[in-house]
Image: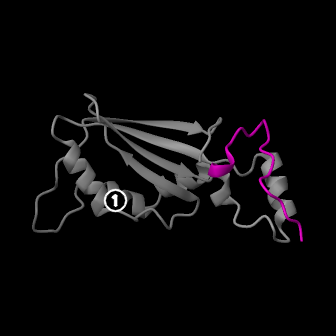
Amino acid sequence: MLSLGRPRVLETQRASWSLLRPRLPCLDSADSGSLLASLEKGLLMTIIKINAITVPAGGGDELAHRFAARAGAVDDQAGFEGFELLKPIDDRDTWLVITRWADDESFQAWVNSPAFGHGHRSDARPADKPAAPKVGMSSELWSYEIAGGSSR
């Protein structure tokens, strides 16, 4: 049985071990060689999608409420790794929706899924209620990969 402590993070990856650890369930298994090979080939690279949503003054609480109502809706999507909703604590009016994905294909599969359409349609409401107005005035999607970092 191969037993590795912290694997050497490849310079080409530049990803911190703390961010890779959830993707590598067990390096002491018979599959550890293929996991390390995947690391070397760059096949296990988290991508970050940030939806920057500009909301009108006072609209942030409604945005947070809508996200809370859908909590966990994406958790079972293949390739999904995590989510945070960031609320500005300064004078900005832009909230950040940060999602982490195994790869861009996983993200695109979710965007094209019925679950995404259901969760993002403005008419997601009971039949006897009018459609809720859009909370965001505008949004912009940013895409990143991890280039470095640290964690305790």
Among the 4 quarters of the image, the one containing residue 57: top left
Q: Is 68 displayed left or right of 127 in the figure? A: right
Q: Residue furthest right?
A: 1
Among the 4 quarters of the image, the one containing residue 97: top left
Q: Is residue 124 above or below residue 40?
A: below
Identity, as a three-letter code, of the amino acid under mark 1: Gly
Residue at 26% across, 56% down: 66
Residue 123 rendering spot, x and y as whole percentages:
22, 57
Under circle 1, the secondary element is: helix
Q: Residue furthest top?
A: 91
| Foreground pick, 129 / 42 | 42
Q: Is residue 51 above or below residue 73?
A: above
Residue at 60% across, 52% down: 105
- Magenta segment, principal secondary structure? loop
Q: Is residue 150 above or below residue 4?
A: above
Residue at 78% across, 36% down: 11
Among the 4 quarters of the image, the one containing residue 109: bottom right
Determine if the magenta segment contains residue 138: no
Q: Which residue is mark 1?
A: 119
Q: Is 126 displayed left or right of 5 in the figure? A: left
Q: Quadrant of the N terminus?
A: bottom right
Residue at 79% across, 41% down: 10
Residue 81 rendering spot, x and y as whole percentages:
55, 57
Magenta-highlighted residues: 1-19
How many numbered circles does the render carry? Answer: 1
Residue 6 rendering spot, x and y as whole percentages:
77, 53
Q: Residues within 10 Å of mark 1 (few under 14, many from 20)?
A: some
Q: Is 29 displayed left or right of 22 in the figure? A: right
Q: Residue furthest front?
A: 152
Determine if the magenta segment contains residue 8: yes
